[in-house]
Amino acid sequence: DGYRNTNQVSDDYRYQDGSYDTPNDGYYRGGDEPAQEEDAQSDVTEGHDEDDEVYEGEYQGIPHPDDIKEKQKKRAPAMDDEYRDRADLMAERMEDEEQLAHQYENIIEECGHGRFQWTLFFVLGLALMADGVEVFVVGFVLPSAEKDMCLSSSNKGMLGLIVYLGMMVGAVLLGGLADKLGRKQCLIISLAINAAFAFLSSFVQGYGFFLFCRLISGLGIGGTLPIVFAYFSEFLSREKRGEHLSWLCMFWMIGGIYASAMAWSIIPHYGWGFSMGTKYHFHSWRVFVLVCALPCIASLVALKFMPESPRFLLEIGKHDEAWMILKQVHDTNMRAKGEPERVFTVSYIKTPKQVDEFIEIQSSTGTWYQRWLVRITTTLKQVWDNVLYCLTAQYRMNTLMLAVVWFTMALSYYGLIVWFPDMIRYFQDEAYESRVKIFDEEEVSHFTFNFTLENQIHRNGEYRNDKFIGMKFKEVRFEDSLFEDCYFEDVRSSETFFENCTIISTVFYNTDLYEHKFINCRLINSTFMKEKEGCHIDFEEDNDFLIYLVSFLGSLSVLPGNIISALLMDKIGRIKMIGGSMLISAVCCFFLFFGNSESAMIGWQCLFCGASIAAWNALDVITVELYPTDKRATAFGILNGLCKFGAILGNSIFSSFVGITKVVPILLASSALVGGGLLALRLPETREQVLM
């Protein structure tokens, strides 16, 4: 009878409205609160708390860092969060984030740098490689695709720019979503969109559908760059961040080399494909488009086995999930180092105050599409709030300066990257025209032409009873000439015209000498029978080998710059790297005045690309480090979207001066690089800064 049973004791200690009532029997119970805390900790450790989620494996729950604080707040009269000023909540959150930043840095240092980071390095590298491939795909397939799709010059220009337009939208949209939905989830969405529409674009036949597919494909791949750098940086310690983010940039170069090599190996084999009737053709350039989707698909598959960023999970209050991922990183690295007995000593991690709340709609409220519409609009509003936050007083100056640096860098780099091949092609055309053969007042009769005529001008000639059978005209012009009783059969032509000619009693059978090729000509008793089907546009005969070689060398030339920037990024700092690289690139631009041949242009292109790559790498690093975790991908996406806008302007402006003058492109690129480089020197240095 001296012992009270357990049920009676538990009845005496009843939990009501956030506090424990004790029996009023005059006995001192002593230490109620500490005892309760000890019991609570025991329950959590053993995984018996019904309110907590129990994970499988050795981990059975870790006490949330704010559990004790929250219970104390419940016992003390305190103002409820909903009645507190938002500014107070934000101030508390900022304080929590600062504490978390330093604690997280210590945790990452304890986890070490090893097998886990290198695995993630290659997985994300494949995604970055897919971004590099996307930039080159359209340029490589245009010489072949223009014939299959009968593309005019304006169509080709639009196809070249539409990819950048998609990447611009994708960078802003998907980068913003990555700060709300998670790095891994948004990167999977981004890669899936790119892979699906890149695959589809290789099969569609019409220009409109192909243009749409490349637009959406670009939108998907546009999100990879901001997400990849934000994702990888959150697994790196301060000492490793600059160097290893720079090594990651090498995969963009590898993407360019991969695209060049595959184009060189596949596209010239025009017979690699199949046809279904006369309407559907699958030629070698479509095989090339499929092969270019492989890095994206490989990264998409490998990413399924990678965890979410624990820094992002902590930012949204998912403490236990973040703890388990960090323990996984620690254990993976320790096992790889031969120290499996090393224990992960972190028991709890600071989580910031949660201010924004997403209100879940009950399944009984409205229709399914109404619920999804609310979810989507709410998420997009949060993304837009993040965009505006990057322009608040705290970040406005850094954002504006970075925007100018990104834009000037993109305008000059992408403009010159397009200008170099166009200038090389222009030099080729000049050399070709200098070798033209001119025939004056020739008279040919009863002769059969069954061979190719190329790069010739025939003036005031007379051709009587001649036959042109199974031949090709290439860059041939007939001026003020007479054709009488001639016969043309199975003739193909390219850039061939008849000007002010008189054509009498002549038959054209199965030729592509269409009406627009006869300029101010008199056709008397002449007959056109069974014209060749297909496109009526004359296409330039591009030197495909030279196009692939120039792109290959341009991509390979950035290797020394990548290595140097990676080794020096953490030694000389991000700001000096950006400023120095942009100023050296500006000096390289002035040497373009001496580029009067194909070989000189190729050499200056390689030098320019090698000098400018260090600025790109440092820009990627400093953009990641200047913004807090919940705004990092959004800010990177905005700046990268502005970069793609600069690329569109650069492509349009620089290409319009080819063959007219070199002064404007060179001066525009140089001045943009000098201005951006000097402005970059005013940015804050982030080498010693922890990720906020």
Image: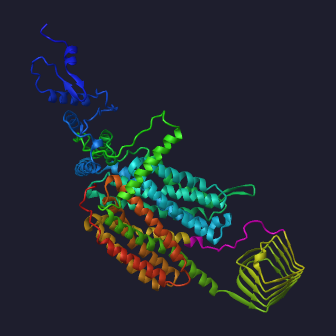
Residue drawn where x is 52% and y is 83% of the image: 597
Residue 674 placement, left or right of 26: right
State the extent of the magenta-drawn residues as a range: 530-546
Magenta: predominant secondary structure element? loop
Q: Quadrant of the N terminus?
A: top left
Image location of residue 184, percent across then percent down: 41, 48
Q: Is residue 148 visible?
A: yes
Q: For this rendering, which residue is in front, 500 or 342? A: 500
Is 634 within the magenta?
no
Residue drawn where x is 42% and y is 62% of the image: 640
User: Within the image, what quadrant is residue 273 found in?
Assistant: bottom right
User: Within the image, what quadrant is residue 471 found in?
Assistant: bottom right
Residue 272 placement, left or right of 244: right
Is 539 within the magenta?
yes
Image location of residue 625, percent across then percent down: 31, 59
Image location of residue 654, percent across then percent down: 51, 77
Q: Residue furthest top?
A: 1
